[in-house]
Amino acid sequence: MTPIKINWQPDKTVTTPIYQQITAFFQQRIANGDWPVGAKLPAQRQLAAQFGVNRSTLITALDDLIAVGLITSNPGSGMAVSGNHWSSLLAEHVDWTQYVKAGQFKPNTHALQKINQFETDDIIRLSTGEPAPDQFPRALFQKAFDHLGRHLTSLNYTEPAGILALRIQIARHLAKVGIQTHPANILITSGSLQALQLVSLSLFPKNATIYTEAPTYVKSLQVFQSAHTQLSGVPMDSQGMAYWQLTPPSNGSQAIMYTIPTFNNPTGIVMSAERRQQVLTFAQDHQIPILEDAAYQDVWFDHQPPQPLKAMDTTGNVIYFGSISKSLAPGLRLGWTVASQPVIDRLTDVRMQTDYGASSLSQLVLAEILANPDYETYQANFRAVLAQKASAAQAILHRYWDNGIATWQAPTGGFYLWVHLADRINIPKLLDLATAHNVLFNPGNIYDFQPNQSIRLSFSFETTERFERGIQILTQLIEQHFPV
């Protein structure tokens, strides 16, 4: 389809911001039916030239249009007019962009929106932090479904903190890593992300400081920032967070520490047992609560990592987040929070104001699976396959990138390689080039507090063959656009 021809320019003499003029122009043409659903739009570079604006101004306008569903952007096919129901509302002259921008929850960065949008089956997903589909334990789930099918009597709302049978199994599971807890101290959540949101809504005072590793997964989220807190990055060394480099909160101010001590996302660093004790002592001495994100606790290769901070916590200072998303199935949408009783009670109360609990079916299924002795066998096989894929991925990088393109550290668990690219490589440009060639990776900047020259590559999701094909394409793009 031939792209729409546009003969219009914003008026730079008026006070209305340029991006709003562009947004209003698109809204009017679509609402009036001048541009039909599916109509192809010119490329961003052409639009910017036509409007006489820079790319950043244009992208701001396009992001607004995408947010309300008027246009879509698809890798390889460009932008097109969407058939979204918002179009009919806009035809009635409702300016939904004002409402979209008015919400308290901050939008993802443009880079993250692009990554989330492009993660489809057509893309080689070197970005995706999920177990590979071929590692799905069908037999475990089939057995759980068969048993539930014979005994299921209802799927009503669960008790507020989650189904007791599942909390009992999780308490038993946590005992294997040294956490001695009771079902009453466990809250079932819809994954770790909901746990983070509940904590930020329920426990964070306004303008609190959140100390976290730099780089870190939570920097790629807006959940803490939307709660009007301030993230403060703390450097890491090979043993984890360099806690002595943070400035303790002043009198009258409040702070929280967020850490991923086991296979930090994105770097893969494992905090040593000695450093864990030091961090715990430092936090206790300065009365700083700790949020321990243990999403990758069970995803180790050859050697089990040190015990969680929560296992060493004797004062109730640590709130522990666990999840089944990395070690079993993210689609179950289940995680758990372990904390002192007052904290669990508070989180449970807020949780009941939002969604009345995680899926009862998912909870029943997970309780069955965790109670099955074959789950341990599955976990051992899962880790073995993952270790093989990590080794194969590194061999591929050595084959293509040992000639001065990149360096990295060998992971001992988790899903990722944290890869430092040569300084000559422009990572944002490489991302644009890669997505145009149906390859997706995560740029390191989304995780860090300052620009860096790293990218995160996942070896967990794709097959080794597709991983290599993705690296081949990236290598060709680097050699073509960023030669030595």
Image: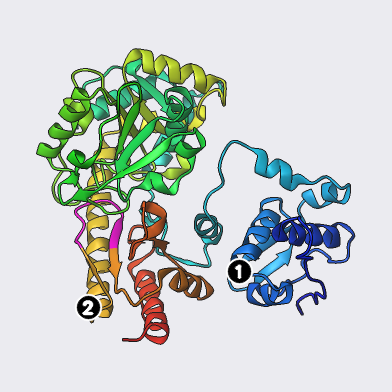
Residue 375, image quadrant: top left
Q: CA distance from mark 2 to mark 1?
A: 35 Å
**Label of residue 55 in the image:** 1
Q: In which quadrant of the rendered image does the N terminus lie?
A: bottom right
**x 40%, y 23%: residue:** 187
Give the answer, above or below, for where 379 lies relative to 69. above
- Work out which residue is located at the far left of the displayed protein and give it: 274
Can residue 351 be found in the magenta stretch?
A: no
Between disc 2 and disc 1, whose residue precedes? 1
The amino acid on which the numbered mark 1 sits, given as a three-letter code, is Arg
Residue 289 shown left or right of residue 208 in the figure: left
The x and y percentages for residue 198 are 46, 28
Residue 6 shown left or right of residue 360 in the figure: right
**x 88%, y 66%: residue:** 34
Asked if the residue at tag 1 contacts the one at tag 2, i.e. Cβ–Cβ closer than 8 Å, the answer is no
Residue 300 shown left or right of residue 152 in the figure: left
Observer-nearest of 91 and 237: 237
Give the answer, above or below, for where 453 lies relative to 378. below
Q: In which quadrant of the rendered image does the C terminus lie?
A: bottom left
